[in-house]
């Protein structure tokens, strides 16, 4: 049982790294086998198809990504407004990580969303969870629920812009715009 859990973990880690770095379609199961050190027969016993492996990788990434964001926000003492702004500070930290290539869910949706409904659904659920999380922070900061969409769009736009530009600066720009929104100032 331990060997299966270790093999599963090795395959997921190797696959996620390869998929994120090179894309879902560009990476074959043999490359994942080589990177994970798990024999192909065992790999297919754990994940009967590449689609199943992609879904498992995205599910694991979703859980980890949301937990990291929440832990970061929760670790920031201060006002409810500061918790909203902490989202953008965390994005800056994430964008600064080596190998940052944007949102794996947007990437997956772009590559496979039209041909794999399960990947499209996982991407939608991830974005919905993020929206719900930010909405909770915005409402706790005394802002109307409908205003949360603006903060989510700032964050999502920063993610895409940072991936394309190769700089973490969009998180700071979006954070400054969010701060102006929180104070009721015009965003320019």
Image (tube, grey):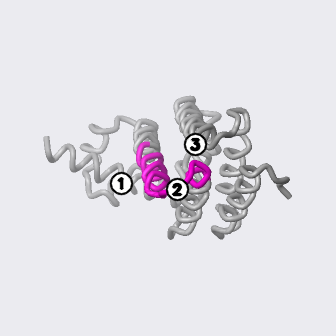
- Could you give the CA–CA distance between mark 2 and mark 3, rounded to whole angstroms? 13 Å
Quadrant hosting residue 130? top right
On residue 78, the disc is 2
**Residue 93 magenta-highlighted:** no
Quarter of the image with the C terminus in it: bottom right
Query: Residue 24 vs residue 12: left or right?
Result: right
- Looking at the picture, does residue 149 appear above or below residue 88? above
Quadrant hosting residue 48? top left
Residue 31 point in image, percent of width and height: 40, 57
Q: Which residues are magenta?
A: 63-84
Q: Secondary structure at mark 3?
A: helix
Q: Which residue is mark 1?
A: 13
| Circle 2 Cα neighbour tier, 10 Å, few/some/many (<14 / 14–19 / ≥20) | few
The residue drawn where x is 21% and y is 50% is 6
Mark 2 vs mark 3, foreground winner is 2
The residue drawn where x is 19% and y is 43% is 4
Q: Which residue is mark 3?
A: 137
């Amino acid at each position: 049982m331990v060997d299966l859990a270790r093999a599963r973990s090795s395959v997921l880690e190797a696959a996620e790294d390869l998929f994120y770095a090179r894309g879902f379609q560009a990476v074959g199961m043999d490359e994942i086998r080589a990177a994970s050190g798990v024999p192909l027969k065992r790999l297919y016993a754990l994940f009967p198809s590449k689609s199943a492996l992609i879904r498992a990788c995205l599910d694991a990434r979703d859980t980890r990504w949301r937990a990291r964001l929440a832990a970061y926000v929760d670790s920031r003492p201060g006002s409810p407004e500061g918790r909203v702004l902490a989202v953008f500070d965390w994005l800056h930290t994430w964008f600064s990580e080596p190998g940052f290539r944007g949102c794996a869910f947007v990437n997956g949706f772009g590559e496979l969303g039209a041909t794999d409904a399960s990947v499209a659904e996982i991407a939608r659920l991830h974005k919905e969870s993020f929206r719900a999380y930010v909405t909770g922070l915005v409402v706790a900061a005394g802002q109307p629920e409908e205003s949360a969409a603006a903060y989510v769009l700032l964050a999502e736009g920063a993610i895409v812009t940072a991936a394309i530009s190769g700089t973490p600066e969009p998180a700071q720009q979006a954070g400054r715009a969010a701060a102006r929104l929180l104070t009721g100032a015009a965003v320019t």
